[in-house]
Amino acid sequence: MNLEPLATFHVDLDPVLDLGDSQWGHRRVVNIVGGTFDGPRLSGAVLPGGADWQVVHADGMISIDTRYTLRTHDGAHVYITTSGVRHGSPEVLGRLGRGEHVDPSEYYFRLFCRFETGDDRYLWLNRTLAVASAARVAAAVHYDAYALT
């Protein structure tokens, strides 16, 4: 297996909506309000309207489950889903929760990405799996995605 650079994503977020505790953990929703992505074969805008449906587990780990829409620079629409985990020490997670800048090397934030489109120019994405290394900033998530080849 090899990793081929796919795109760097900047996803803008609304504040966290707290839904409370459930049998799986503490449920939160973070609405996606826009953003951009840019790479060698894939670039464009993140459309508003998606969200991240998170579960914060008892040990502080967060399960990530996003769904949103991309519009490429040439007008194609691509549905993207990511799933992953973010975890770190309670002190680091507290700083992230307060919107402070935290060096991404201080915590683990990794994603698995899937794509879906009907646009002939991007059908290759339907057969592409990607992984990403991410960072949380005050009102956004940044991640570098790599296609598994």
Image (cartoon, rainbow, N blue to C red):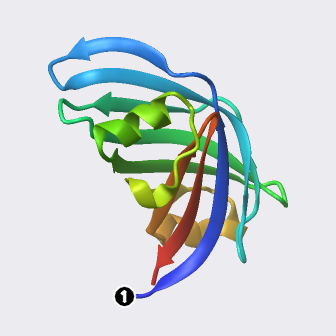
x 39%, y 42%: residue: 92
Q: Quadrant of residue 46?
A: top right
Quadrant housing the C terminus = bottom left
Q: Secondary structure at mark 1?
A: loop
The residue singled out by tag 1 in the image is 1
**In the rendered view, would you say 33 is above or below 70?**
above
**In the rendered view, would you say 35 is above or below 116?**
above
Residue 36, how many percent across, how many down? Answer: 74, 51
**In the rendered view, would you say 63 is above or below 133?**
above
In terms of depth relative to the viewer, which is nearer, 38 or 122?
38
x 72%, y 37%: residue: 34
x 45%, y 61%: residue: 105
x 45%, y 50%: residue: 82
The answer to whether residue 114 is seen in the rendering is no
The residue type indicated by label 1 comes to Met
- Label count reads 1
Residue lying farthest to the left in this orientation: 23
On the picture, is 135 further left or further right than 44? left
Residue lying farthest to the right in this orientation: 74
On the picture, is 58 further left or further right than 37? left
Q: Quadrant of residue 54?
A: top left
